[in-house]
Image: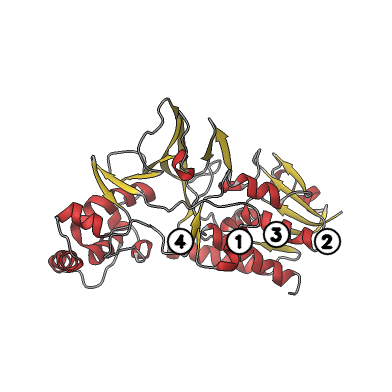
Amino acid sequence: MYDYLIVGAGLFGSVFAYEAKQRGKRCLVIDKRDHLGGNVYTEEVEGIQVHKYGAHIFHTNNKNIWDYVNRFAEFNRYTNSPVANYKGEIYNLPFNMNTFNRLWGVVTPDEAKQKIEEQKRAAGITEPRNLEEQAISLVGSDIYEKLIKGYSEKQWGRPASELPSFIIKRLPVRFTYDNNYFNDQYQGIPIGGYSKIIEKMLEGIDVRLNVDFFEHREQLAALAGKVVFTGMIDQYFGFKHGVLEYRSLHFETKILDTDNYQGNAVVNFTDRETPYTRILEHKHFEFGTQEKTVVTEEYPLEWKPGLEPYYPINDAKNNSVYKKYKELADNEPNVIFGGRLASYKYYDMHQVIGEALTVVHKEFGE
């Protein structure tokens, strides 16, 4: 018998397992994939740590979380400074004075603000009803047309005029020459990859890979006093209130016989015609000098069973369905629900760790 069966070897499950072991508990961690780490898994290819499920840049303002994750790895000084490629024109992200200078030739913050205000007035939007109107009311029509519209429509698979405005309400706009995408105090990439963090967390803990919880549910649940479930909450309850919607991703990864393909770790392609949303060049996450390079194109997809769910579609309809599942989860005996899929919420890594530690303290009465 185990004290806890932990379904999912991603960040939430691994943090919980590590903390439970520190308290003398016996844990069994299972995962349906053939590797640890969930979506933060990194794999070494040509001496380069490849982010197999999209770019993962650790960032947080919470010193306790930063200190916690640094127990398991040393982090480099990587700063997320993506660039946007619009039909061969290159712009800095997030939208800042470098972006505005490239677009309009403006030099001062006042000039940039004036240009944006002119475009906002011309649009005449008072109450934004969708993503398109929200974006124009924040940054004007030029930035919207070149750097937001195509990317958002590819990402979500719907016209921007049909997407909810909340998706873009926290759009970062800066009137400084600062290309750092995040405002957080702490930021970096673990040297040697994220997989090493998960491996350290799960040292001395029983792990079984290639195990699907739902194929052996009764036998697995019988092995432990409690279950920690980090999978899809609607699947756990047999989709009885309906299926929650997600966006998924398809990755095309290539090894190229060049030492530098695009000059940046992340390049977003913001025109509608390019089928992928971005290209990652993984060596730049760790300032690599290898002779070859590895690049990944990201293609957004509508989620369907068999694909990996990445981005919850948190519109009114789906949130209403999730609320019903949350009520069931709150009353499910001896099961702890946590993580991105069980919470139907897009979490950054520091938020997942924070949630896991909160659950740990609640579970163990600390």
In what element is the residue under mark 3? helix
Residue at image coords 33%, 52% = 152
Q: Which residue is identified by label 1?
A: 353
Q: Residues within 10 Å of mark 1 (few under 14, many from 20)?
A: many
Q: Is residue 285 left or right of residue 28?
A: left
As shown in the figure, which amino acid type bears the numbered disc 2?
Gly
* Residue kind at label 4, given as amino acid type: Asn
Label 4 with label 1: CB-CB less than 8 Å: no
- Residue 365: image location, x then y, percent: 75, 74
Q: Mark 4 or 1 closer to N-term?
A: 4
Circles 3 and 1, Cβ within 8 Å, touching? The answer is: no
Q: Is residue 235 above or below residue 251?
A: below
- The crowding category of the residue bearing disc 3, from other C-alpha atoms within 10 Å (few below 14, some 14 to 19, many at least 20), is many
- In this view of the protein, can residue 83 be seen by the observer? yes
Q: Which residue is mark 4?
A: 314
> Badge 2, how many Cα within 10 Å: few under 14, some, many 20+?
few
Badge 2 is on which residue? 24
Per the model, the C-alpha gap separating discs 4 and 1 is 21 Å
> At which x and y percent is residue 31?
68, 45
SS of the residue at dot 4?
Answer: loop
State whether residue 310 is above or below residue 113: above
Q: Position of residue 46 (x, y in %)?
A: 53, 30
Kindly report the distance in space between the C-alpha atoms of the residues bearing marks 3 and 2. Answer: 13 Å
Q: Give the labeled residue for mark 3.
A: 16
- Give how far apart the Cα atoms at labels 1 and 2 are: 20 Å
Q: Quadrant of residue 67?
A: bottom right
Q: Is 60 on the left-hand or right-hand side of 91?
A: right
Q: Secondary structure at mark 2?
A: loop
Image: 115 above or below 38: below
